């Protein structure tokens, strides 16, 4: 059997073992208990023709929220694919969780195997799976989107080095595709990881003899990748002023309250399922990992001892990832607070210990390159010992605090649990029109505020609502249980011209005054100019990918 394939199978087996608790019957507890709800909202969007999904009608107490206009797209589109194949919402969520674990190891292996031998690359993949922070992400925090993005990160790095080596159109398209998935997966991880990706690419360009051609190839592929993710990126960048974002960086989410101590990073190996709190008394673990910590210590020693024998590319890579590993650790410490206050966008990271995701990646690379510097016999011995140590030390973390064996889709998508999910994350992407927190779930039907009127045949979908409003005398004012947000437009009696509407001062509901008679009212969630441009760029980028794939292959251009 091909050695690479054997290594990938081995990493899949490791992933199955650490994911075993995920696939037990029912579901489980986690901090971010909205994964099933988010997938439900995504699938509802797609079923009702809202593509791409932006407006989530059941969120914000049932008044609606532009969740997927800003929040991670890739993991939930992935989950929607599995739901379309007939799996339940719960099981589809579990599949995406498993993918985020398995893909991390396999992507790391593919990346490392481009410049070191298979065995050290395999250990690097195992180290990227069996790291405490990954267990924290899935089994404690339930940070599915963040973990998914961290799994895609080495895939982007793999795409970069593959394109530089092969210089073929398949590699060009793969890097664009991987980049697009990554950019649309998790905003914070993109922010944290971009300096590493850029530095890695620059170093490889400088090490390459054909620097200009390499720069053109990488730039073109990256631009195409950004184009593929434009449907998501442009609204995030240019429509942030349409929602209340102050909550995301203040109070509990102020980064100043969430720095990690050296003891938490390197000494304290206790595990917990509580919250991140101000000071050192957090109820969860920020451990770098014993093996991962030793790898970072071994990096400078390896560079010094093998400064002549180590191949040029691995040496530069070892140095690069060692430096970024130290930098990511520094940024988790309160000693970096002046840097956090200087670089304003970092405030959206919220938790400085999120940089441990980057530390996990860097330590896995450093560990693998360290192994590759040893002779073959030592490689085999150390590889066995390290994989055993990774399992022995970290496997115990990959379990949930509580499980609910009898839970089904109905448990989460009906009744009180569903209503609780509707109320959760209310402040995350709250439209400016919604000023106060509702006391109750939105009414199922429109409410006549004044006048003699009756609302019949009310329908509410993810991006559309309609009703017949019968006013028997004078005028009647009706409020619809949908929060106003650009670009909800209302049309009366099938008119092609939208009618102006009022906005409720508390919950931001769409409110209309009707004259005597029966009026057909229809509301459509339409795209703003930014979204139209973003969708067009993504569509054009998809066409370009198709053209590149089907275009005749010119061997002369790849030499």
Image: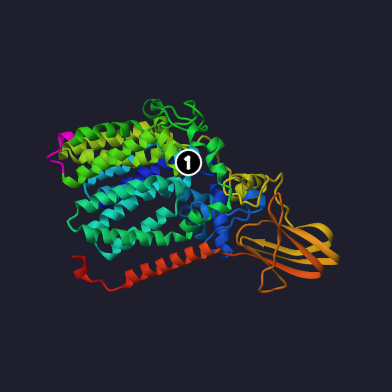
Left or right: residue 66 versus residue 454 is left
Q: Is residue 148 visible?
A: yes
Q: Nearer the viewer, residue 336 or 510?
A: 336
- Up/down of 22 relative to 210, above or below: above
Query: Which residue is labeled 1 in the image?
Result: 347
Q: Residue at x 77, y 69 (%)?
A: 519
User: Residue extending furthest front?
Assistant: 342
| Dominant secondary-structure state across the stretch colored magenta | loop
| In the depicted structure, whether residue 87 falls above or below residue 363 | below
Camera-side residue of 531 and 359: 531
Q: Give the image location of residue 43, x and y in percent.
A: 55, 58
Mark 1 crowd level (few <14, some 14–19, many ≥20, 10 Å Cα): some
Q: In the rendered image, which quarter is residue 326 located in?
A: top left
**Count of number-bearing discs:** 1
In terms of image quadrants, where is residue 29?
top right
- Stretch in magenta: 304-310
Residue displayed at 48% across by 33% down = 256
Determine whether 4 is above or below 527 in the image.
Answer: above
State the image coordinates of residue 507 (x, y, percent, origin top left): 69, 50
Image: 16 above or below 52: above
- For mark 1, give the secondary structure: helix
Q: Position of residue 91 (x, y in %)?
A: 51, 50
Image position of 159 (left or right of 332)? left
């Amino acid at each position: 059997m091909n050695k690479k394939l054997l290594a990938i199978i081995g990493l899949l087996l490791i992933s199955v073992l650490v994911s075993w608790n995920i696939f037990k019957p029912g579901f489980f507890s986690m901090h971010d208990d909205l994964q099933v709800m988010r997938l439900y909202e995504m699938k509802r969007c797609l079923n009702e023709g809202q593509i791409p999904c932006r407006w989530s009608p059941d969120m914000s107490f049932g008044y609606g929220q532009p969740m997927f206009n800003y929040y991670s797209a890739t993991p939930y589109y992935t989950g929607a694919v599995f739901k379309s194949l007939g799996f339940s919402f719960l099981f589809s969520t579990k599949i995406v969780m498993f993918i985020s674990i398995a893909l991390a190891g396999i992507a790391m292996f593919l990346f490392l195997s481009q410049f070191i031998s298979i065995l050290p690359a395999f250990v690097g993949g195992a180290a990227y799976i069996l790291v405490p922070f990954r267990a924290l992400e899935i089994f404690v925090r339930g940070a599915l989107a963040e973990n998914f993005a961290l799994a895609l990160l080495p895939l982007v790095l793999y795409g970069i080095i593959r394109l530089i080596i092969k210089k073929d159109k398949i590699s060009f398209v793969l890097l664009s595709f991987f980049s697009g998935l990554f950019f649309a997966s998790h905003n914070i991880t993109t922010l944290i990881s971009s300096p590493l990706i850029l530095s890695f690419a620059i170093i490889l360009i400088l090490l390459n003899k054909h620097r200009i051609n390499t720069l053109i190839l990488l730039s073109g592929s990256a631009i195409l990748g950004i184009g593929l993710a434009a449907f998501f990126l442009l609204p995030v960048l240019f429509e942030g002023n349409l929602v209340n974002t102050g909550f995301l960086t203040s109070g509990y989410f102020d980064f100043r309250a969430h720095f990690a101590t050296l003891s938490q990073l390197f000494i304290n190996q206790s595990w917990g399922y509580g919250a991140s709190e101000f000071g050192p008394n957090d109820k969860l673990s920020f451990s770098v990992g014993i093996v991962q910590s030793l790898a970072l210590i071994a990096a400078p020693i390896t560079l010094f001892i093998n400064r002549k024998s180590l191949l040029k590319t691995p040496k530069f890579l070892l140095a690069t990832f060692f430096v970024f590993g130290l930098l990511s650790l520094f940024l988790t410490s309160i000693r970096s607070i002046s840097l956090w206050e200087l670089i304003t966008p970092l405030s959206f990271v919220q938790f400085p210990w999120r940089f441990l995701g980057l530390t996990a990646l860097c330590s896995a690379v450093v560990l693998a390159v360290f192994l590759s510097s040893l002779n073959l016999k030592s490689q085999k011995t150390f590889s066995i010992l390290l994989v055993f140590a990774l399992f022995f030390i970290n496997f115990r973390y990959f379990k949930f605090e509580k499980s609910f064996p009898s839970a089904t889709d109905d448990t989460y998508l009906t009744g009180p649990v569903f209503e609780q999910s509707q109320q959760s994350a209310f402040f995350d992407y709250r439209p400016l029109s919604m000023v106060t927190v509702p006391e109750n779930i939105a009414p199922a039907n429109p409410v006549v505020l004044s006048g003699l009127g009756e609302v019949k045949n009310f329908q509410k979908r993810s991006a559309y609502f309609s009703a017949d409003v019968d006013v028997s005398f004078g005028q009647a004012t009706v409020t619809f249980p949908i929060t106003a947000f650009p670009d909800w437009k209302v049309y009366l009696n099938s008119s092609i011209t939208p009618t102006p509407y009022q906005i409720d001062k508390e919950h931001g509901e769409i409110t209309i005054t009707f004259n005597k008679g029966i009026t057909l009212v229809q509301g459509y969630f339409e795209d703003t100019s930014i979204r139209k441009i973003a969708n067009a760029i993504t569509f054009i980028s998809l066409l370009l990918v198709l053209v590149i794939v089907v275009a005749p292959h010119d061997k002369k251009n790849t030499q």
